[in-house]
Structure formats: C-alpha cells, structure tokens
Image (cartoon, rainbow, N blue to C red):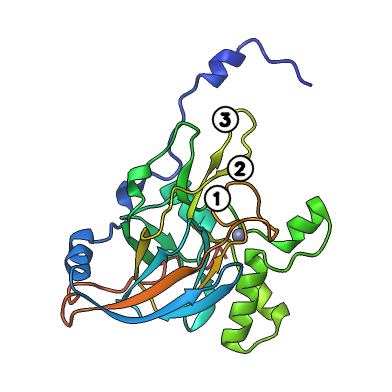
Amino acid sequence: MTQPPQDAAVRRAVKPVICYPVETLPQPDMALYDAARADLQKTGETLVPPRDARTFTVPAGHFFRITSVEGSQVGDLNLWHANDLSERFYSGKTRALHGTHITRGQQMWTAFPHLRPMATLTHDSLEWYGMDEFGGSVHDVIGTRCDPFTHNLLSGGQYHHCCHSNLTRALAHHLDIQLAEASTHVHDVLNVFMCTGFTRETGQYFMKASPVRPGDYLEFFAEIDLLGALSACPGGDCSSEHSSDMAACYPLLVETFAPKEGALDAWHAPKRNGYDQTHGV
Ligand SMILES: [Zn+2]
C-alpha cells in the first residue's frame, strides 16, 4: 500500500474532461432516416435459435431489426464489411466516442484504418430505460462476448455454446472456412438488450436481468454493405450466469427491410477515414 500525498484531496477533486467531445463528429441525418423508416418493405428474416448464432447480410442503404421473441433474451452482435472482413466493428472506439451503451442516433464504427460509421441505430424500443440507480443501461459496448477461453480460465471445463463459439460456427458455415480461421474474425460485440454497468466500489463489470420483453426491438441503418452474425447468448436474460446450459434461453429474430425507392436519395455512404497512414515517415 502507498501513503496518500498531502494534496491527495486536491488532486482527486480535479474535474474530469470528456476525452472525445463529439461536437465535431459528423452527425447522421436522423430526420432523413425517420422519414425513410416510415415506409419500409421487408426483404427477409432469420431466426437465431437459443444458444446458437446465424449470419445475415444487409445492403448499404437498407435497415435491419433485432427483435425479442418468446422471452427475455440478449444477443451478441458482430458486424463486418460484407466484402472485407478486416473492416469490422470496433467496440472500443465506439465506446470512446459514444459512451458505454449506445441507443438511437448513435453509430457503430469500423476498425482502423477505415474508422467510419457502419451502422446507425434508428430505433430502440428500450430507449426509455436510460441509466438505472446501479449505473446499469442496455446495449453495451463494454463487454467483449462470453467465450470458452475465459470460461476455461475461471471454471475449467469445455463449454461450446458461448457466443464466441456460436459466432465462430455461424461465420465458418457462411463463408465455408475452417473454424480456426473464422474464430480470428470474431470480435468484441454490441451486447444487444443486455443490461450492464460497472460497480462504483470496485469498477467491476456487472450484468442484471435484461428489461427486454417480447416485441422489443433495436433497429439499424446499414451505412455500408454488411455481413452480420448474431448469437442468442447462453446467458438468456443474463440475470444469473452465462457459459452454461442453465439459463432459460429464447430465439432472436433478425429482419431486413428496404426503403422506398428514392427515400434516401439525399443519403451519402460514409467515406473511409482521411488519415494518410504515413505515420510520420
Ligand atoms: Zn454470450
């Protein structure tokens, strides 16, 4: 243990500053998206079975929804550029820009060197939840994904239906590639419907029963051509544990929608990041 310095209280009292003020961040045109989403035509659907995952594709300029059906269930979402798996969702930078949880009007960003919005959240039926008395909120970009490696580290044993394995199997099947390769493309997720936060005392990641109920949905606008994979987490509503077959689990529905012809004529697909990548050389 170290001894606090004489001016410890003064040092602690320094006010925080926001790391990434978003005043200069280009904002999505929500009025345009709202107008487009008022008249959508459904183009397809995929039912994700409990403790398993499925892939889906969404063309740039279309929408997709993840809906709770049958019972409270959280989902682990991975997104890639449909034609370039190296351009994948960057959970950490999305968190740095938007905070620990995201909702309507915020965006999911892609990895370096692309760093551009890949999806905009256009509707969130759980937007009312806000932040609860424990500091918990929904749709976090702080958790990584439940995985068999951490499970083995903490509890031993081999469990094969963690979201990491579910996403790996689904991607391997979709691309007809080996599991070992698919596993390297699986990345930190958007925790759809999951209610999480950090404890004030120890800063530990916590989860609690998701407030999601059948009929609730989270809707996205695809800013680029997307390949998605969604796992119906073995944690179910994540009220007690994950990485086992103990929790009650339910399917999740993914639906894709096309806007009406001309509804998004004013929309421009986001460009890749403008940094020249010479890195000072
Ligand atoms: Zn999971």
* Residue type pointed to by label 1: Ile
* Quarter of the image where one finds residue 216: bottom left
Q: CA–CA distance between discs 3 and 1? A: 15 Å
State which tag comes first along the sequence, 2 or 1.
1
Residue 205: image tag: 2
State ligand 1's quadrant: bottom right
Residue at point 65% right, 31% down? 202
Residue 142: image tag: 1
Residue at point 35% right, 55% down? 106
Tell me the element at label 2.
Answer: strand
Q: In screen coordinates, is 250 left or right of 220?
A: right
Horizontal and vertical percent position of residue 17: 44, 34
* Residue type pointed to by label 2: Tyr
Q: Residues within 10 Å of mark 3 (few under 14, many from 20)?
A: few
On the question of residue 63 being in view, the answer is: yes
State which tag comes first along the sequence, 3 or 1.
1
Q: Which residue is mark 3?
A: 200
Q: Residues within 10 Å of mark 1 (few under 14, many from 20)?
A: many
**Quadrant where the N terminus is found in the figure:** top right
